[in-house]
Image (cartoon, grey):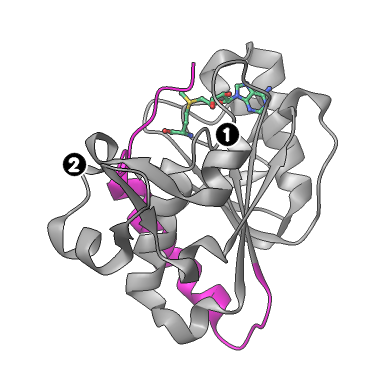
Amino acid sequence: MAFTFFFRDEQILALGVEHLVPFTIGRSNIRILNAGCAMGMETYTFAILLAEKIGKFSLRNVKIHAIDIDNENVDFGKTVREGIYHKDHLQRIPADLFKKYFSPAEKPNHFIISQDLRNLVDFEKYDLLTLKPLRNDYSLVICKNVLLHFNYQQRIDVISMYHDMLLNEGLLVMENTQNMPGELNNKFRRIVNYGQLYEKIG
Ligand SMILES: C[S@@+](CC[C@H](N)C(=O)[O-])C[C@H]1O[C@@H](n2cnc3c(N)ncnc32)[C@H](O)[C@@H]1O
């Protein structure tokens, strides 16, 4: 259930970064929700893409709230907070970005992501199906390969909750195979021709 890897769905994450840039101009508090972050590979992929786009200086205004439900086998919170990964998990990262953002960790064959990017990320254990909005000031919600575990009504309920959690015109990124349920056409509008990138209506 927690299958994931660095640079998975890179194209839609990069589009999310592009469309997030206007939110970063003149704002000192940009909040991003990464729902179903698993071990943080998605979280740090997004952080790397964002850092490349807006630069270190603007990053100080950004917080990424990474959330996931409990997992019996891996302590997601510990992994996300430490930002340490085995070299086998890092092969898909472009060489220049790997060199720039990772350094050897104390544990053999493990690498740690840069402190700048770790500082961006807060992990919280959270079950989306409780449907309790965590905040209402996110500029972007990333929720990929999570909703497929839910039934149709649960998807509607969770996406409606994202609507409540986003600022006006806030963004929602989902994986390519996750279409917006028709019931929510008055809440989100798709803003790209290819990919599941939506903007909050209202
Ligand atoms: C297949 S992984 C996807 C990881 C990452 N988003 C990606 O696209 O690579 C699905 C994640 O959703 C999480 N998940 C499933 N049900 C959840 C729930 N009710 N609340 C929060 N997270 C949940 C799982 O624990 C798992 O980490």
* Residues shaded magenta: 1-30
> Is 12 contained in the magenta span?
yes
Determine the residue positioned at 67% across, 34% down: 159
Determine the residue positioned at 40% across, 22% down: 3
When asked about the image quadrant of residue 52, the answer is: bottom left
Front residue of 51 and 202: 51
Query: Is 50 displayed left or right of 158 in the figure?
Result: left
State which quarter of the image contains the C terminus.
Answer: bottom right
Neighbours of disc 2 within 10 Å: few (<14), some (14-19), many (20+):
few
Neighbours of disc 1 within 10 Å: few (<14), some (14-19), many (20+):
many
When asked about the image quadrant of residue 158, the answer is: top right
Q: Residue 30, relative to residue 16: is it above or below?
A: below
Q: Measured from the top left, where is residue 172 in percent x and y?
A: 55, 48
Residue 91's disc is 2
Q: Residue 200, relative to residue 103: is it above or below?
A: above
Compare marks 1 and 2 and give the one earlier in the sequence.
1
Observer able to see residue 160: yes
Helix, strand or loop at label 2? It is loop
Looking at the picture, which amino acid does disc 1 mark?
Phe
Is label 1's Cβ within 8 Å of ligand 1? yes
Q: Residue 105, relative to residue 62: is it above or below?
A: above
Q: Which residue is mark 1?
A: 76
Determine the residue positioned at 43% across, 53% down: 44
Observer able to see residue 35: no
What whole-number distance in Å separates the C-alpha atoms at marks 1 and 2?
A: 20 Å
Looking at the picture, which amino acid does disc 2 mark?
Gln
Q: Quadrant of ligand 1?
A: top right
Residue 29's disc is none
Determine the residue positioned at 22% across, 50% down: 93
Q: Measured from the top left, where is residue 146 in percent x and y?
A: 54, 26
> Is 119 contained in the magenta span?
no
Is label 2's Cβ within 8 Å of ligand 1? no
